[in-house]
C-alpha cells in the first residue's frame, strides 16, 4: 500500500512553515520516503494558501511520482492544513527538554525527533544525524518514560537535555539551510487565499456556535433533576456485550482511576454466552482471585448474584460489535460505521491496557497505516487528506487484533 501524503507544520527560527511529507512506502520492492521539494531544497510555505497554490499548479518537484500525488492538487485549503498530530515545534525543543521526562514531554519530543530524522535522511543532513547520535537518549524516546526512570534513567535524560541545550541550534541551522519558498502562481494564490479567509471565518463562527450550545446545555442540565442511576451505575461496574465471529459474549468491566479492569485474571477475560449465563457464573464460582474482586463494591455484586436478584442488562454504549469491521475497513472509509468502529477501538484498547499488551497501541498509532485509517474514520477532519486505497494490509492487521482479543476470552 502507498502511504498517504501528509501536510505537516514545522516550527523553525524563520517562523512556522507548512509542507508535505510522504511517510515511508514501498514501490517496486524498494522503500521510499520524501518531502515536498526539489533537488537540494525543501519547499515550505508561510501559510496553507501558498501551499495550495503551489500544489495546484507546479509540476516539477520530488513528490510528483508518488502513487497518491494525483489526489493532492484537488484538495481544498482546509484539507491541506496540518492537524495537531503533525505540528512539530522544533524551536521549542530546548524548553521541552528542560522539563521533567513525563509521558507528555517524552511523547512530544519523540514525535519531533522522528520527523527530524526523516528530514535528515531525505535531505542528507549529516550534521543533524551527528547531533542525534551524540546522546543515547535520542534513540529510546519512542519507548516512552521507562528508559528515563531510576538513577540510570535520570542520567540518560540529563545527558539528552544537555546535548539539546548545547547543540540543537546545529539542527535548526541545518534545516534552515535547505528550506526554500518557491514561486507560486499569482492567480492560484489569489483563489486559495480567498478559500483560507473563508475557512477561518467559518471556524470562528463555529466556535461561537459551540460556546452558545455549551451554555444552553449547561442551563438545561441545571434544570433537570437527577433520576435513578440503577444498580450497576451505583456500584461503578458495567455489564458489556461483545459480538464477534457470529457469537455473543457477556462480561463485566469497570474503571479504577481511569484504568480498565475486566472480570478475569492473568490477561484472560471471563465471559458467558448469555446474560443469564453470566449471572449464573457469578453466583456459583469462587471469584476471590478475579481482578474485579479488588473493587470496593464487588461484594454488592456477589450478594445479588448469590441470592438470584442480579439482573444483567447491557446498555447500548457497552455493546461492542466487532464482527464485519475487518471487511468494512478493507473496502475503505465510506464502508465503515464510525460509531461501531469507535466502540470497537475502546474495547480493544481497554482489554490490551488491562492485560499489559502493547500490540494494540502500537498498531493503532497514527504513524502506522491502520492507525491513520481508523483515526480518520472516527475523527474526520477537513484539514486531513483521506487515506488512499488499497486497505488490504490494514484490514489484515485489524483482524489480527480482533483475533488476539478473541483468544483472550475465557468462556464459562
Image (cartoon, rainbow, N blue to C red):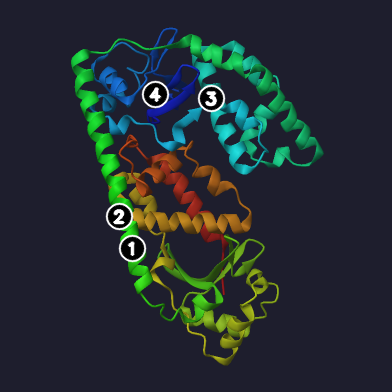
Q: Which of marks 3 and 1 is in front?
A: 1
Q: Quadrant of the N terminus?
A: top left
Report the residue marked by disc 4.
Answer: 18
> N-terminal of the two: label 3 or label 2?
3
For the residue pair 117 and 256, the one nearer the viewer reads as 256
Report the residue marked by disc 1.
Answer: 217
Rendered residue at 22%/33% (across/down): 198
Report the residue marked by disc 3.
Answer: 90
How far apart are the alpha carbons under marks 2 and 4?
32 Å
> N-terminal of the two: label 4 or label 1?
4
Q: What element carries label 4?
A: strand
Rendered residue at 18%/16% (across/down): 187
Q: Can residue 75 be seen in this view?
A: no
> N-terminal of the two: label 3 or label 1?
3
Q: Nearer the viewer, mark 2 or mark 4?
A: 2
Q: Where is residue 351 in the image (x, y as percent from the top left)?
A: 55, 59
Instruction: Please tell me whether residue 283 is drawn above or below residue 135 in the rendered image.
Output: below
Q: Is disc 3 in contact with disc 2, using a CB cutoff of under 8 Å? A: no
How far apart are the alpha carbons under marks 3 and 1?
40 Å
Report the residue marked by disc 2.
Answer: 212
Amino acid at each position: 500500500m502507498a502511504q498517504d501524503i501528509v501536510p505537516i507544520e514545522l516550527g523553525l527560527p524563520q517562523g512556522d512553515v507548512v509542507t508535505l511529507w510522504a511517510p515511508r512506502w514501498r514501490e517496486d520492492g524498494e522503500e521510499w520516503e520524501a518531502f515536498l521539494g526539489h533537488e537540494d531544497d525543501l519547499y515550505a510555505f508561510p501559510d496553507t494558501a501558498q501551499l495550495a497554490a503551489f500544489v495546484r499548479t507546479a509540476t516539477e518537484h520530488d513528490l510528483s511520482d508518488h502513487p497518491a500525488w494525483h489526489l493532492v492538487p484537488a484538495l481544498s485549503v482546509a484539507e491541506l492544513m496540518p492537524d495537531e498530530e503533525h505540528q512539530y515545534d522544533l524551536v521549542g525543543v530546548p524548553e521541552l527538554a528542560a522539563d521533567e521526562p513525563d509521558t507528555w514531554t517524552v511523547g512530544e519530543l519523540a514525535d519531533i525527533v522522528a520527523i527530524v530524522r526523516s528530514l535528515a535522511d531525505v535531505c542528507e543532513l549529516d550534521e543533524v544525524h551527528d547531533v542525534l547520535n551524540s546522546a543515547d537518549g535520542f534513540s529510546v524516546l519512542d519507548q516512552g518514560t521507562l528508559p528515563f526512570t531510576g538513577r540510570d534513567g535520570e542520567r540518560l535524560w540529563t545527558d539528552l537535555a544537555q546535548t539539546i541545550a548545547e547543540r540543537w541550534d546545529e539542527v535548526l541551522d541545518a534545516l534552515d539551510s535547505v528550506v526554500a519558498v518557491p514561486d507560486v502562481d499569482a492567480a492560484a494564490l489569489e483563489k486559495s487565499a480567498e478559500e483560507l479567509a473563508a475557512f477561518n471565518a467559518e471556524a470562528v463562527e463555529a466556535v461561537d456556535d459551540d460556546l452558545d450550545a455549551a451554555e444552553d446545555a449547561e442551563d438545561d442540565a441545571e434544570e433537570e433533576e437527577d433520576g435513578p442511576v440503577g444498580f450497576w451505575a451505583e456500584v461503578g461496574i458495567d455489564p458489556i456485550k461483545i459480538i464477534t465471529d457470529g457469537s455473543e459474549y457477556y462480561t463485566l468491566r469497570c474503571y479504577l482511576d481511569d484504568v480498565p479492569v475486566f472480570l478475569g485474571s492473568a490477561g484472560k477475560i471471563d465471559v458467558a454466552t448469555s446474560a443469564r449465563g453470566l449471572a449464573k457464573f457469578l453466583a456459583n464460582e469462587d471469584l476471590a482471585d478475579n481482578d474485579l474482586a479488588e473493587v470496593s463494591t464487588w461484594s454488592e455484586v456477589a450478594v445479588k448474584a448469590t441470592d438470584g436478584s442480579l439482573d444483567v442488562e447491557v446498555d447500548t454504549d457497552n455493546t461492542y460489535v466487532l464482527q464485519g469491521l475487518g471487511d468494512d475497513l478493507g473496502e475503505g472509509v465510506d464502508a465503515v460505521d464510525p460509531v461501531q468502529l469507535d466502540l470497537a477501538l475502546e474495547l480493544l484498547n481497554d482489554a490490551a491496557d488491562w492485560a499489559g499488551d502493547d500490540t494494540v497501541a502500537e498498531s493503532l498509532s497514527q504513524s502506522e497505516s491502520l492507525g491513520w485509517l481508523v483515526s480518520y474514520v472516527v475523527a474526520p477532519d477537513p484539514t486531513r487528506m483521506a487515506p488512499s486505497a488499497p486497505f488490504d494490509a490494514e484490514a489484515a492487521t485489524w483482524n489480527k487484533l480482533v483475533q488476539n482479543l478473541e483468544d483472550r476470552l475465557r468462556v464459562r
